[in-house]
Amino acid sequence: MTEMPVEILLVEDNPNDAELSLYALRKFKIANHIRHARDGAEALEYIFGSSTDSEKPPVQLPRLILLDLKLPKIDGQEVLRKLKSNESTRTIPVVVLTSSREERDILETYNLGVNSYIVKPIDFEQFTQAVRDVGLYWLLLNQVPLANT
């Protein structure tokens, strides 16, 4: 039996934020196939295989990546750098969902090619609404090149 393609790759090390994100995505039936990576190394391994060499063709291509910046092993900016430097993964929408309001983080991620930068709301309802809105926009409304489907 073949595994269904992942629609969303959630890269989040905080178990509470990951649980809230998964809850929101499932509650609003935004994605059926979600993969949760707990650090940057796990995310890159999922996409590029056991060799996290971003020059190799990807193994798995999600339709959307929700990426935290402050991650163990490999931080979110390095994950973003590898994704946007590979021709096969460059056009996958990446939305940074982070607690960092640092101007240098915002500027650096946009320079690396992030599609959107969202500071995590602290309030539960705002957080689930933000995740829902991100999923609805990037999976249902946004048009991607046919090569990504």
Image: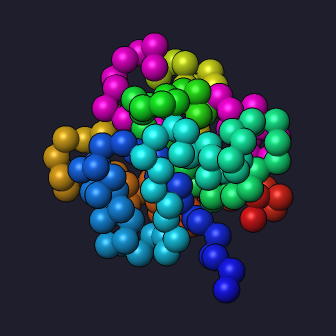
Judge whether residue 97 can be spotted in this image.
no
Within the magenta stretch, is there residue 2? no
Whether 23 is drawn above or below 84: the answer is below
Task: Name the quadrant containing residue 7.
Answer: bottom right
Give residue 108's position: percent from left, percent from top. Answer: 55, 19
* Residue under the point 41% across and 15% down: 103
Of the pair 123 and 20, the residue shown nearer to us: 20
Q: Is residue 20 visible?
A: yes
Residue at the extreme front: 50
Which picture quadrant has residue 59? bottom right
**Which quadrant is the C terminus positioned in?**
bottom right
Viewport quadrant of the N terminus = bottom right
Q: Residue at x 68, y 32 (%)?
A: 82
Q: Position of residue 38 (x, y in %)?
A: 42, 46
Question: Residue 49 at x, y = what percent?
Answer: 70, 50
| 55 left or right of 95 in image | right
Which residue is at the far top? 104
Residue 130 pos. (x, y %): 34, 51
Q: Is residue 3 above or below residue 96?
A: below
Residue 100 within the segment the image draws in magenta:
yes
How many numbered callouts? 0
The segment highlighted magenta reads: 81-105
In front here: 122 or 78? Answer: 78
